[in-house]
Amino acid sequence: MIKKSSVKTLLTGSLLAFSLVSSFSHATVVEIRTSLGPIQVNLFDNTTPKTVANFLSYVNSGAYVNNVVHRVESNFVVQAGGFNYSGKFPELDSVATGTPVQNEPKLSNLRGTIAMAKLGGSVNSATSQWFFSLANNSANLDVQNGGFTVFGQVIGDGMQVVDAIAAVNRFNAGGALASIPIRNYTTADANNNVAVTENNLVIISDIVIIDATVATHPEIVPANNTLINSSNNGGSNSGSDSGGGGSFAWLSVLALIGLGRRIYRS
């Protein structure tokens, strides 16, 4: 069995100047280059300017080079932005994070949107982690933990790639990696101590700006979050932080039950 090893912190100083996000170029379209293909995302610069600026600060710093898609929940979310692969698994480097960004829950968490992950019970705690919605998650995520900030939408055939990632078998490597997609790998491989390599993980090689115009794709009209201000907004229904330890026993996707539909960052 793969032995337990803590996720180590990436010691870099490149992200310590996040207060200077205004110096970064605003971009409407970025391309997330994954092992299974590119995903183009139209960012909502004008609707969620603080969140877009925060995300682009990580993009421009190179924080997402060799980033790992570390969480998939079927018919719910695909999550990344927190950990980078540097040659070993399950040891991953945590992305160095800056000052959390103020929550901007203006848009609805529908299928194909990208939104920021947060600490459980902390509304303004988003830093580097983000997720794609695989389904209409508005009833949950538009209100949970103060609402989750949607800051972009997948365009073109990008959701085919997102769905392909979601279809990869998942394993429990403990802690924040409790539902990580691992390609071309079986429970028998894990039981026989077959090493997981870069070729098995869903890796984001980089995220790059492909259109720096602030107002492209005017045909995209995102749905507003109409639930956040309702009297029964469920703000106390916050996800718990799963950044702690846990067993590194490997389980097939069929054994991953009871994880709940909550969003958190580690």
Image (cartoon, grey):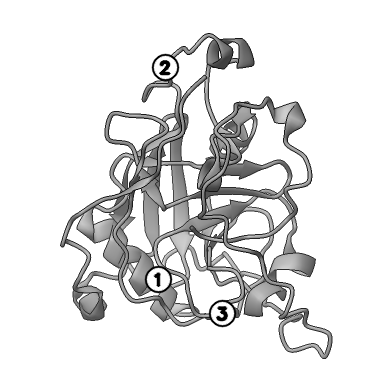
Give amino acid for label 1. Val
Residue 132 in sight from this viewpoint: yes
Give amino acid for label 3. Val
- Residue 143 in percent (x, y) is at 72, 76
From the viewer's side, name the closer residue of 70 and 77: 70
Which residue bears the numbered disc 1?
A: 52
**Of helix, strand and loop, which one carries label 1?**
helix
- Residue 71 in percent (x, y) is at 56, 44
Tell me the residue at 57%/65% (across/down): 220
From the viewer's side, name the closer residue of 120 and 105: 120
From the viewer's side, name the closer residue of 52 and 203: 203
Which residue bears the numbered disc 3?
A: 123
Tell me the residue at 27%/53% (across/down): 63
Asked where in the image residue 148 lies, by quadrant, the reply is bottom right
Residue occupying the far right of the picture: 232
Mark earlier in primary sequence (3, 2): 3
Q: Are marks 3 and 1 in contact (CB under 8 Å)?
A: no
Which residue bears the numbered disc 2?
A: 195
Report, in whole angstroms, how far the alpha carbon at label 3 lies from the one at label 2.
Answer: 38 Å
